Amino acid sequence: MSKVRFIVLSVLAVLAVSAVASASASAHEFLVNGKPVTGTEPVTSTGGLFRLVAATKIIDCETANGFGLILSGGKTFIHDIHFLNCKTSQTKCAVHSIGASNGLILLVNVPDLLVTRKTSGGAEVTADEFQENPTTKEFITLKFLAEAGGSCSEFGTETKVKGQVAAQVNNGTESLEFTEPELQGNSLEAFGKAAKFFGTAKQKLVNGGVLTAD
């Protein structure tokens, strides 16, 4: 990742999360080696299968690679995430984000914030809440295209994914876990219906060290 990209993302991060941070103060923060973040910390992430479920519609992505920046103070974070080899549950109905090739979903400048959430069983946990873009008011627009001999009759031509979804922070594995059952309070929607998102992303500090959240 180039220094220019770090600088650009830093500027975008300040613009994208300023409204979120001012409207919703967080009592939690990310820590590097157990200490508060004093500068901008670049973070990469990798994950296996991710799944979006909205009623009977399912979209699976085999892997995900991400890049994020934790801002000074450790309370706000912004992500770029690439979901790879994505497929719909309808045979020969391909999916992609705008401007991407079939099977590729690109999320850009997604702001997130550490919050307290409850598990499905009621236990309080620290969670990383991913929020829709404050400008576009959505996560992403997904496009669907029928392959040769196929159909996207179940999915239509596109859907806007909106709302927010939180991942439980696992300090032991330095991971973000979109658990199943999901955390209470999620408001994600797709195809105009309530949606759920599952998967796990392993995080790694680019400059080295251990990333946790209090």
Image: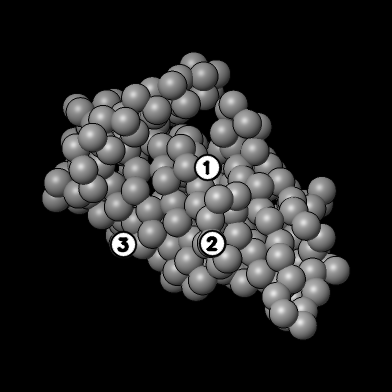
Q: Earlier in the sequence, mark 2 or mark 1?
A: 2
Q: Residue 165 at what x, y percent from top left?
A: 59, 47
Q: Give the secondary structure at mark 3.
A: loop
Residue farthest toward the right in the current orientation of the protein: 153
Tag in front: 1 or 3: 1
- Circles 1, 3 touching at the beta carbon (< 8 Å): no
Instruction: Count up the numbered dots.
Output: 3
Give the residue type at disc 2. Answer: Ser
Q: Give the secondary structure at mark 2.
A: loop
Q: Give the secondary structure at mark 1.
A: strand
Question: In the figure, 92 relative to 9: above or below?
Answer: below
Q: Residue 189 at what x, y percent from top left?
A: 73, 48
Q: Residue 89 at what x, y percent from top left?
A: 71, 75
What residue would you read off at disc 2?
Answer: 101
Circle 3 Cα neighbour tier, 10 Å, few/some/many (<14 / 14–19 / ≥20) = few
Is 166 displayed left or right of 141 in the figure?
Answer: left
Give the residue type at disc 3. Answer: Thr
Question: In the figure, 144 relative to 209: above or below?
Answer: below
| Residue 51 visible in the current orientation | no
Whole-angstrom CA distance, mark 3 to mark 2, is 32 Å
Q: Residue at x 32, y 31 (%)?
A: 8
Question: In the figure, 96 relative to 162: above or below?
Answer: below
What residue would you read off at disc 3?
Answer: 173
Tag in front: 2 or 1: 2
Circle 2 Cα neighbour tier, 10 Å, few/some/many (<14 / 14–19 / ≥20) = few
Circle 1 Cα neighbour tier, 10 Å, few/some/many (<14 / 14–19 / ≥20) = many
Whole-angstrom CA distance, mark 2 to mark 1, is 24 Å
Q: Residue at x 44, y 52 (%)?
A: 81
Whole-angstrom CA distance, mark 1 to mark 3, is 19 Å
Q: Residue 154 at what x, y percent from top left?
A: 84, 68
- Residue 130 got which mark? 1
- Residue 104 got which mark? none
